[in-house]
Amino acid sequence: MLSWIDGGPAAAVNLQNRGLAYGDGLFETIAVRAGRPSLLDGHLARLALGCQRLAIDADLARVGEEILAFSSQLGDGVAKLILTRGDSQRGYAPVAGAMARRILQGSPLPSYPAEHAELGVQLFACQTRLAEQPLLAGLKHLNRLEQVLARAEWQGSELAEGLMRDGQGRVIEGVYSNLFLVREGVLHTADLSRCGVAGVMRGALLEQAQVLGIALQVRDIAFDELALADEVFVCNSVYGVWPVRGIPALKLNWSPGPLTRKLQAVARTLLDT
Amino acid sequence: MLSWIDGGPAAAVNLQNRGLAYGDGLFETIAVRAGRPSLLDGHLARLALGCQRLAIDADLARVGEEILAFSSQLGDGVAKLILTRGDSQRGYAPVAGAMARRILQGSPLPSYPAEHAELGVQLFACQTRLAEQPLLAGLKHLNRLEQVLARAEWQGSELAEGLMRDGQGRVIEGVYSNLFLVREGVLHTADLSRCGVAGVMRGALLEQAQVLGIALQVRDIAFDELALADEVFVCNSVYGVWPVRGIPALKLNWSPGPLTRKLQAVARTLLDT
């Protein structure tokens, strides 16, 4: 598949790259349809926040232009951007003045079963807990061993996603998506100031919910609240919104409800599908 | 400098490598003198534990042989081994049956000032705290953003290392070394079951302390215990043991003591310097 480094075709990265050495960087997973990247402003805004918090020096205007040019060549697919602090010799100390390295990789759009969006998905209840690290919380950085361990906990296609909790058992997110629940007409999603990834689709849905006058709360969600929810859904910037039908291991079940359907339609518009 | 991938010369790794994508792997930093790697058994034992806990499939006998051959070519220097879960397409799910990729990189032995070992070093008091993640604690895995952030907190050469604490303020380790304290003849170092890297030199010193009949405790160390310590030292498998003279920001000072000097000599023997 198509891949670029710093704006030109390349398939390999040199061994001094700090992304490889320490996971010292950020990434974005961008849906591309008909040569156009979806939610580009949201992806760039999250990158900007990540660069600021990790003190990574990147030319984000150039990154944006490269994503546009790359998407245009890709046509339909997923463009994954990895932005690393660049190269350095051995040692954790960042090199002053090093410019970030921009890696773009294309892959086909995943072909999820249509039932995921129509009937909903079932979740695995992951045992891997998310550690609390406020300095990294919310960012889509390259330190993703927790997600790798969580995703390795189940096989097979019956369970499309995994529920991730923090060390206190609070409900945080899916392994590769954010989670919302609806109770008495109010939308709830986890506060991500201690752990979790603040997804671009999550941000866009929160914004649209406000525009639509939907009551919403971003806060800590206790595990027991899942059982009280009227609707549950997961979202990300590739597939949009999937209703959650249940978590078999926890004997929890829900039906897709009106707020889920409304936000699913919003996500479809945002993703231009 | 010399670099190998999977046993042959190579300077770049392909973009599907899971080390780059997710920090999905482990590393070891091995001192090499006169073509011989120091503490090889300790490094291989820690790798074996890491592979087991991350479910990475690696031929560690072959890794050991490659480190020996690489060291022989390197002569004097530091051999850094990165062992990643191998390659995969986009997605956190590990690929069944994928063999680990073995990356070796050589660099010169660092030239630390002789005073570090003789008179001791001063520590910076890092604000970056170590998150608690029992599934990863102790391992030298590739998710090292906490160390990058901590190391970026100070510049200049007057402070040779940084003190890292956990979210509760407990004393855990240095940014690139482990920390010991001595009080009334007893050696203490942090329990690393919730966070921290279990250094190969730390393990070797604990083993030798037992052989030498030195009383030792591996346990949680409260921040206040630093002020009560008679001696403090840091260690790693490249420089051995450095006495800690003080932590200026915390107005703490120590003098190199007899137990520090004894274990420093042990480390010199282990590193063959």
Image: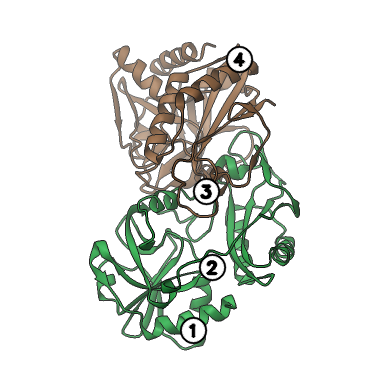
Chain colours: A green, B brown
The mark lying in front, picked from 4 and 1, is 4
* Residue that numbered label 1 is attached to: A210
Q: Are marks 2 and 3 on the same chain?
A: no
**Quadrant of the rendered structure where residue A115 is?**
bottom left
Q: Are marks 4 and 1 on the same chain?
A: no
Chain-order first, disc 2 or disc 1 = 1
Label 1 amino acid? Gln
* Residue that numbered label 2 is attached to: A238
Image mark for residue B22: 3
Q: Position of residue A128 (x, y in %)?
A: 35, 51
Residue lying farthest bottom? A213
* Residue that numbered label 4 is attached to: B72
Q: Position of residue B271 (x, y in %)?
A: 50, 15
Q: Looking at the picture, does residue A240 appear above or below residue B86?
A: below
Whether label 4 touches label 2, CB < 8 Å: no
Label 4 amino acid? Ser
Mark 4 element type: helix
Residue at horizontal 62 percent and vertical 72 percent from the top: A38
Residue lying farthest left? A251
